[in-house]
């Protein structure tokens, strides 16, 4: 997962945080020297509890009659966080608060396809 994380940080200097949860394996990294960063322990709980619950709810809603769920952006006071479902988990890409997150979706999706392409 380290190569995926590094490639996601390389998408933009405004990527401040990347987490990958697959099954029970969680890897998270943040850019050094961040202003307004959340605590590492709360990040861990967010990735293990909150984000999977959010994605479960939105995925179920999306499957009813919306064509599924591709990703979702959440705007906290200090940053954006983008949740991208993957097989057995999710990838979270955090961005600086002044970003327009949808501008990076294509590049993020490209890196996810590279990392999780079928064998």
Image (cartoon, rainbow, N blue to C red):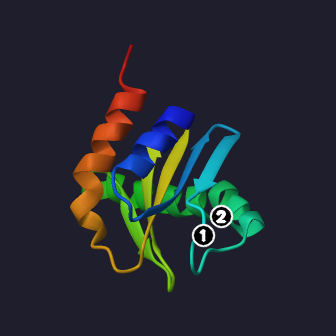
Point 39% across, 65% down: residue = 14
Mark 2 residue crowding within 10 angstroms, few (<14) / some (14–19) / many (20+)? few
The circle on residue 115 is: none
Provide the secondary structure element on which disc 2 rests: helix
Along the line of sight, which residue is nearer the eye, 65 or 43? Answer: 43
* Horizontal side, residue 113 vs residue 47: left or right: left
- The image shows residue 107 at horizontal and vertical percentages of 26, 48
Point 63% across, 57% down: residue = 47
- Which residue is tagged 2? 46
Dividing the picture into quarters, in which one does residue 26 lie?
top right
Residue reaching furthest bottom? 77
Dividing the picture into quarters, in which one does residue 40 lie?
bottom right
Count of labels in the image: 2
| Residue 103 in view of the camera | yes
The circle on residue 33 is: 1
Along the line of sight, which residue is nearer the eye, 65 or 118? Answer: 118
- The image shows residue 48 at horizontal and vertical percentages of 68, 55
Q: CA distance from mark 2 to mark 1?
A: 21 Å
- The image shows residue 77 at horizontal and vertical percentages of 50, 86
Mark 1 residue crowding within 10 angstroms, few (<14) / some (14–19) / many (20+)? few
Q: Upstream in the sequence, badge 2 or badge 1?
A: 1
Provide the secondary structure element on which disc 1 rests: loop
């Amino acid at each position: 997962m380290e190569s995926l994380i590094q490639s996601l940080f390389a998408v933009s200097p405004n990527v401040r945080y990347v987490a990958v949860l697959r099954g029970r394996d969680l890897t998270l990294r943040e850019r050094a020297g961040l202003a307004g960063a959340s605590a590492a322990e709360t990040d861990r709980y967010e990735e293990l509890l909150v984000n999977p619950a959010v994605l479960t709810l939105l995925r179920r809603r999306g499957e009813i009659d919306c064509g599924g769920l591709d990703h979702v952006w959440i705007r906290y006071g200090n940053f954006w966080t983008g949740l991208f479902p993957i097989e057995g988990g999710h990838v979270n890409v955090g961005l600086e608060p002044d970003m327009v997150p949808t501008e990076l979706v294509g590049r993020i999706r490209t890196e996810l396809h590279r990392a999780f392409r079928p064998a």
